[in-house]
Amino acid sequence: MAQKIIPIILCGGKGTRLWPLSRESYPKQFLAITSNSNKSLLQQTQERISDLDNIDNPIIICNEEHRFLVAEQMRNIGVTPKAIILENIGRNTAPAIALGAITASKMGGMDSLLLILSADHIIDNIGNFHKALNTSFKYALQDKLITFGIIPYYPETGYGYIESVDNINDGDIEVSKIKKFIEKPNREVAEKLIKSNKFTWNSGMFIFKTRLILEELEKHSPTIIKQCKDAINNSIKDLDFIRIDPLKFSKCPNIPIDVAVMEKTTKGLVIGLDAGWSDIGSWKSLWEKEKKDSRGNVIKGKIIDVNSNNCYLRSENRLLVTLGLSNTIVVETADAILIANKENSDNLKSVVGELGSKGYKEGLLHKKIYRPWGSYLSLVEDKRWQVKRIEVTPGSSLSLQMHHHRAEHWTVVEGTAKVEIDDNIFILSENQSTFIPLGAKHRLSNPGKITLTLIEVQSGDYLGEDDIIRFKDEYGRNQHGK
């Protein structure tokens, strides 16, 4: 096959069903959440296709708040994306795929195949996955729009289904015409669906020619194409990122590619995939995928368990002791603990929504916040003061900035800090400290070869992260805010 394959990795989503580990500030696609890999789900998505023939570097679509996470995680596995496109607002998969296809066409990829992948899936059997991919490439080159239907083994109510007709076998791969897509069914309906080999789970993965998907979007969803073309044509290149026009993109319909194209086209095919696939849509589904002990428990972290059965127990920080639990999810993080009946874990999305409506920041933010220069962890806080641990990667710098409402005291605990305060520039080593008065221009840098770790004590009448006025920033961030 001579055609180039351009992956388009959809990296949006908030991952609320895996709260409190996954949150809007650091959703599940950036987490190394499975026990069989120390790579994030995004990194695993990229690496499982990296040795395909004619595969190109990916185009990644993500929320602008996650742009540096995407760039850093790709850098850590030695991948330079063709483009990282920043959405100002989530508009589901049809507009995201349109952005990727338009960008691919502008990069000379009109005749290329686009491989659409979600950044948060798990696939255990890479061999079977590649076999299905290679079959799908053949049909995509014949001007077919391909999606993958997962062979169901149980009546799952958390996935949509695809009904197919005219099944044929291409070797040991089943290829069928798409009859219709079915929304997530209730238990009774799901039990009926899996009794027939005409129904598969909707994986949300696709393969098609760039030219063909643009033509089909133009035919069936012209508003999406118009708004996405306008958003790309009015985009701004910002470092390694493409900032699309936010007003144009916001006018896109909020619909999946299934509704925008696949339900309407006459060119759709579904290819059966049996490769240990999961989208890890809940703690229960993660429990199902993970290796269990003799009592059916998945245990991660600092945990003492006695006589529990069929549980998912995870501790990120503190000692967790469990006794006699059954079918229970327990997840401990630095600032929140989830305790849930495993069968009710699908309801977490509504719970996270309630946390937001009541103003609990734990619904959205971790105590540890990632920045392009490193991270900070909130250790303890009160109304007029707070303590943070700041880590700066080698060679990185925070912006030259000032605060109107707070002063800061920095103490280095590991590494070397270069400090700028107004017109003074000096070096701090371990156990040395300095004070930054309210209103002083200042910058923190790491000139060393190891991570700089320091303790920051803030004091003032307002401690919000939006009390930042930036004068210089090497990451292209706005003058105000985080």
Image (tube, helix red, strand yellow):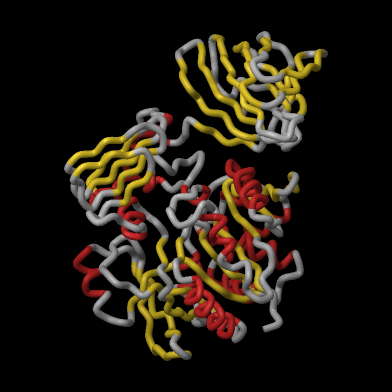
Instruction: Give residue 74's position: percent from left, percent from top.
Output: 64, 53
Instruction: Give residue 49's position: percent from left, percent from top.
Output: 59, 68
Total residue callouts: 0
Instruction: Tell me the residue at 54%/64% (across/down).
Output: 117
Name the residue nearer the viewer: 39 or 65: 39
Task: Decide if residue 361 is on the left or right side of residue 450.
Answer: left
Could you tell me if residue 223 is visible in this image?
no
Task: Decide if residue 83 is on the left or right side of residue 151.
Answer: right
Q: Is residue 48 above or below residue 294?
A: below
Q: Is residue 271 above or below residue 286?
A: below
Instruction: Give residue 474's position: percent from left, percent from top.
Output: 76, 35
Could you tell me if residue 397 is visible in this image?
yes
Task: Decide if residue 339 is on the left or right side of residue 83.
Answer: left
Instruction: Tell me the residue at 47%/62% (across/down).
Output: 256
Q: Quadrant of residue 46?
A: bottom right
Name the residue nearer the viewer: 206 or 69: 69
The quadrant of the image that shows the C terminus is: top right
Instruction: Tell me the residue at 70%/50% (across/down).
Output: 242
Instruction: Give residue 467's position: percent from left, percent from top.
Output: 61, 20
Q: Quadrant of residue 166?
A: bottom left
